[in-house]
Image (cartoon, coloured by chain):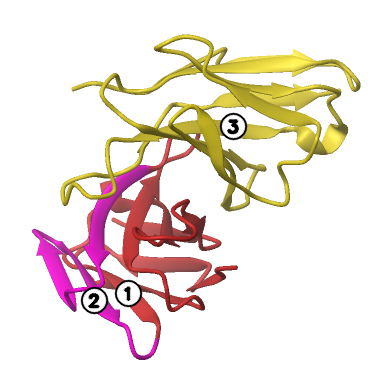
Chain colours: A yellow, B red
Amino acid sequence: EPEVTQTPSHQVTQMGQEVILRCVPISNHLYFYWYRQILGQKVEFLVSFYNNEISEKSEIFDDQFSVERPDGSNFTLKIRSTKLEDSAMYFCASLRSWFDRGSEQYFGPGTRLTVT
Amino acid sequence: GENVEQHPSTLSVQEGDSAVIKCTYSDSASNYFPWYKQELGKRPQLIIDIRSNVGEKKDQRIAVTLNKTAKHFSLHITETQPEDSAVYFCAAASMDTGRRALTFGSGTRLQVQP
């Protein structure tokens, strides 16, 4: 069964540094998402991406964040200047279509970001 | 925006008993309600979902009920087994217009005692 993949699995960075988290969504999916989960807390929506542009973003997704689909397969989340509070597990998810009755959001395994 | 409340935060049951987890949502535009199971350190995995045109859906030991009028939906697990132990999250989204991203509840840690 196809899966969403994410790299790296764990990223440690110093406060103020830029990080890029990478995701490869399932190949025939059209909607792409980034969520984050601070340790022990619920999953929170960051941004969704469809047709090569951001379709929705949450209040968490401020100017420090950006997303890109640089080629036909990768979907990246960039944090320009990391803060301690950015430490979390970041999940990528993809969805084939909202209008397919069997469709669901498939989550990747996550990237654990630790900001020191 | 959407707000999803989930209760209880922890639930401990004996193996073979039933478990019920409840969620409420605030946005009447929401019409898609999935439930995810998350084991420690793993990704959330969909276990069942329901769309607003039905009131109940069942898949073996798992069932979900939806009350659109009350903006309330519940997960029912029967004949619980130790491998059901995990954190369960409910979520809500609108498939049509507006917010198509999932808004998650705060999670329920289910512990099934053998």
| Local crowd size for mark 1, using a 10 Å CA cut-off: few (<14), some (14–19), many (≥20) | many
Q: Residue at point 28% right, 55% down?
A: B114
Q: Name the subunit of mark 3.
A: A
N-terminal of the two: label 1 or label 2?
2
Q: Amino acid at mark 1?
A: Ser
Instruction: Examine the rendered structure and indicate whether residue A61 appears above or below residue A75.
Output: below
Of all residues, the one furthest to the bottom in this rendering is: B69
Q: Position of residue B93 (x, y in %)?
A: 42, 60
Label 1 resides on the chain identified as B
Image point (33%, 63%), residue name? B33
Determine if residue B42 is in view.
no
Tell me if residue B81 is in the magenta stretch.
no
Q: CA distance from mark 1 to mark 3?
A: 27 Å
The stretch in magenta equals B45-70
Give the chain letter at badge 2. B
- When the figure is inspected, residue A81 is found, relative to residue A96, above or below; the finding is above
State the predominant SS element of the stretch in magenta. Answer: strand
Say whether marks 1 and 2 touch (CB < 8 Å). yes
